[in-house]
Image (cartoon, helix red, strand yellow):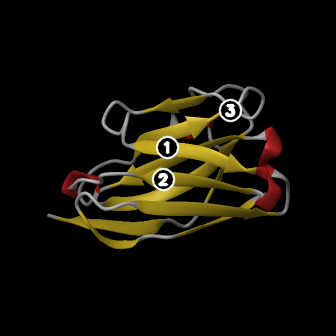
Amino acid sequence: QVQLVESGGGLVQAGDSLRLSCAASGRTLSRYTMGWFRQAPGKEREFVAAVGWASGNTYYADSVTGRFTISRDNANNAVNLYMNTPKPEDTAVYYCAASKVTGWNIISEWDYDYWGQGTQVTVSS
């Protein structure tokens, strides 16, 4: 079992930066593909970014490409999501997730085995 806990959410102004962290316990994350998803009010949960465990390759949704960066922190058994120049449309609850599937372009939430409880990010204009 893997327990995931997100942190770092809050209220941020458009154009500022924010870092979300996902800390794991129970097992090392080094052998899991890690992903971030988000869910805005009234919308379905959507893929944001993923990083593979073997290659370290990353994959992003078009809406965040060039603005967000996902990275592993293996020393602390964590994964981070750096949100640069966030926009009001990035407002959502952000979830991290761990997948046993090998790869870096794992975008379906159904391929993820473990989920955190989510952290709210609100971007004001």
Q: Which residue is mark 1?
A: 69
Q: Which residue is at a point 39% across and 62% down the rendered structure image? A: 93
Disc 1 or 3, which lies upstream in sequence? 3
Can residue 38 be seen here? The reply is: yes
The amino acid beneath tag 2 is Tyr
**Residue 53, located in which quarter of the rendered image?**
top right
In the rendered view, tell whether residue 79 sits above or below residue 120.
above
In the rendered view, tell whether residue 107 sits above or below residue 42.
above
Q: Return the residue nearer the eye: 82 or 53.
A: 82
Looking at the rendered image, the quarter that the N terminus falls into is bottom right
Q: What element does badge 2 sit on?
A: strand
Disc 3 or 2, which lies upstream in sequence? 3
**Residue 106, located in which quarter of the rendered image?**
top right
The amino acid beneath tag 1 is Thr
Q: Which residue is at a point 37% across and 51% down the rendered structure image? A: 84
Q: Which residue is mark 2?
A: 82
Q: Position of residue 41 (x, y in %)?
A: 25, 60
Q: Sort mark 1 into few (<14), some (14-19) or many (20+) by Cα contacts within 10 Å.
A: many
The amino acid beneath tag 3 is Gly
Which numbered mark, 1 or 3, is in the foreground of this view? Answer: 1
Q: Which mark is residue 52?
A: 3
